[in-house]
Image (spheres, helix red, strand yellow):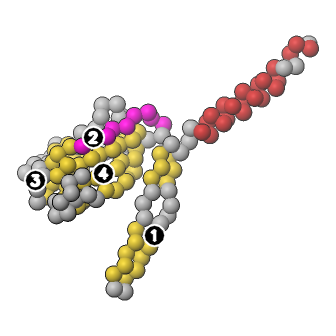
Amino acid sequence: MQRRKWLLPIGIVLCAIGIAGLLLAADEITFDASIEVNKDALELERNPGAQLIDMTGDAISDIVQSFGIVETNAITVAAGVSTYGVGWFRNVTTNANYYVEVGYSPDAGTNFYPFLRLMGSEYTPVHLSPNAILYATAGVGTCNLRTIIVED
């Protein structure tokens, strides 16, 4: 009987380590966005702070892709990313007049429904629908779009 006294304390320690491990595994993704508008009598400022999101997957796609003005093409995502989580889009083209539009196409680009326009050097984080089918096209001139998608 005396030899088993150590089992309970070790069990409690292992349980505590397991709980701590679960706590450390949360909120692996952080993104932050704010908006401030000051024009004449218009004033608006919103800064809700950082968003913390759990990452259950283990893959990231970080690809720069060129889009022209003639056709709409699918946004390339690395093969290991199966469930979309946080997306980060940036038009890495420095010409302020060149824009790229990101959107949805139910028929491989024939009909394109943009929901996002990024002028040269603009970027934005978004939390994507897990199975989004993303397309993009450029306006005015060819643009390079950096797309980062992190599994959720």
- Look at mark 2 in the image and give the residue it sits on: 63
- Which of discs 2 and 1 lies nearer the camera? The answer is 2
SS under mark 2: strand
**Which image quarter holds the C terminus?**
top left
- Look at mark 4 in the image and give the residue it sits on: 89
Counting residues from the start of the chain, the first of labels 4 and 1 encountered is 1
Q: How crowded is the residue under tag 4: few (<14 C-alpha within 10 Å), some, or many (20+)?
A: many
Residue 37: where, in percent of width, then height? Answer: 37, 75
**Tag 2 and tag 4, C-beta contact below 8 Å:** no
**Which image quarter holds the N terminus?**
top right
Left or right side of 118 for 5: right
Chain part drawn in magenta: 56-64
Residue at (88% x, 13% y) in the render: 3
CA–CA distance in space, label 1 to label 3: 34 Å
Residue at (37% x, 53% y) in the render: 126
- Look at mark 3 in the image and give the residue it sits on: 69
Counting residues from the start of the chain, the first of labels 3 and 4 encountered is 3
Residue 60: where, in percent of width, then height? Answer: 37, 37
CA–CA distance in space, label 2 to label 1: 30 Å
Left or right side of 58 for 131: left
- Which of discs 3 and 2 lies nearer the camera? The answer is 2
In which quadrant of the rendered view does residue 77 lie? top left
Left or right side of 46 for 112: left
